[in-house]
Image (spheres, rainbow, N blue to C red):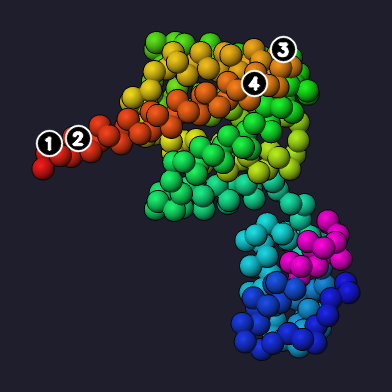
Amino acid sequence: MPIEYQDVVRTGVARQVADKIRAAILDGRLQIDERLPTEEDLAKSFGISRPTVREALKRLAAQNLIRSQRGPTGGTFVSRPDPEGLSSAITGAATLLVGVGAFDIDEIISARLETEAICCRLACERRSDADLAAMRAEITLQRSKLLSDEDFCASDVRFHRAVVQAAGNGPLSLMMYTVVEAFMPITNMIVSHVRERSTVADFHEKLAGAIEARDASDATAVLSELLAYVRDSYALSLTRRAEREAKRG
C-alpha cells in the first residue's frame, strides 16, 4: 500500500489518516476488495495509537469506503462504491438546502431543464420497450381519479426516473438522482394543490410519445413546456398561500 505516512500532522490525526486512505482508494492505489493492513500495522506505519487508527477506520466505514469481515479470512477491505448510497447522501443534503431556501424555484427549474433535456435526447436514442412500458404504466396510473395527491406525486417521480433510466448513462443517472429524488418531491409538495393532474399526465404522454418516436427536438420542447407549467403552478401556490396568510392577519 504505497501511501506516504511521514507528513501526517499530529492535529486531527484520525481525520487526516482517514483522508489519506480515502485518497488512496479514490485514485486507485488501493483496489476494490483489497485488504488493508491490520490496525497494529497501520498504527506503526503512521506512528499513531491503535485507538486513533480505529477512529480513522470508523470514518471511512461511515462513508461506505471500507467494510469489516470476520473469520479466518477476515479483516478490513476496500468496498465497491455504492452509487445509490452516495446519491442518497447527496439528496439528503440537497433537500436540506432547498428547505432552508438556498435555491429558488427558477434555479431548480433551470437545473432540471438543462440536465433532464440531456436525458431526453439520450433516451430517444437508447430507450427500450421496457423503458417505454414503465413510462406508460405511470401515465395510466396518473389518470386514475382514485389516486391520492401523495401517490400522484410519487408516480410523477417514477415517470421521470424512467426517463433518466432510458438514457442509459450511469454517471448521468448519478447526477440526476438529486434532481429527481430531492428537487421533484419538494416542488411537487408545493404545487400539488394547484396543478391539474390531467395536464401533467398529458405532458407525460407527449414526452413518452416523443421518446418512442426518437424525436429529441420534440421531447426537449415538451419537457420545457412541462417545466414552465411547474414554475407557473409554483408561483400560483405561493400567491394563494400569501392571500390566506393576509386574510388570517
Cβ atoms under marks 2 and 4 closer than 8 Å: no
Tell me residue 249's x, y (percent): 10, 43
Tell me residue 66's x, y (percent): 73, 61
Q: Secondary structure at mark 2?
A: helix
Q: Secondary structure at mark 1?
A: helix
Work out whether mark 2 precedes mark 3 in sequence or the reverse, and give the earlier one: 3
To which residue does mark 4 refer? Answer: 219
Say if the magenta span includes residue 32. yes
Measured in 3D between alpha carbons, the distance from the residue under mark 2 to the one under mark 1, in whole angstroms, is 6 Å
Q: Mark 2: few, some, or many residues within 10 Å (few <14, many ≥20)?
A: few
In the displayed structure, would residue 209 be above or below residue 21?
A: above
Measured in 3D between alpha carbons, the distance from the residue under mark 2 to the one under mark 4, in whole angstroms, is 36 Å
The amino acid at mark 4 is Ala
The amino acid at mark 2 is Glu
To which residue does mark 1 refer? Answer: 247
Work out whether mark 4 precedes mark 3 in sequence or the reverse, and give the earlier one: 3
The amino acid at mark 1 is Lys
Measured in 3D between alpha carbons, the distance from the residue under mark 3 to the one under mark 1, in whole angstroms, is 50 Å
What is the magenta range?
A: 21-34
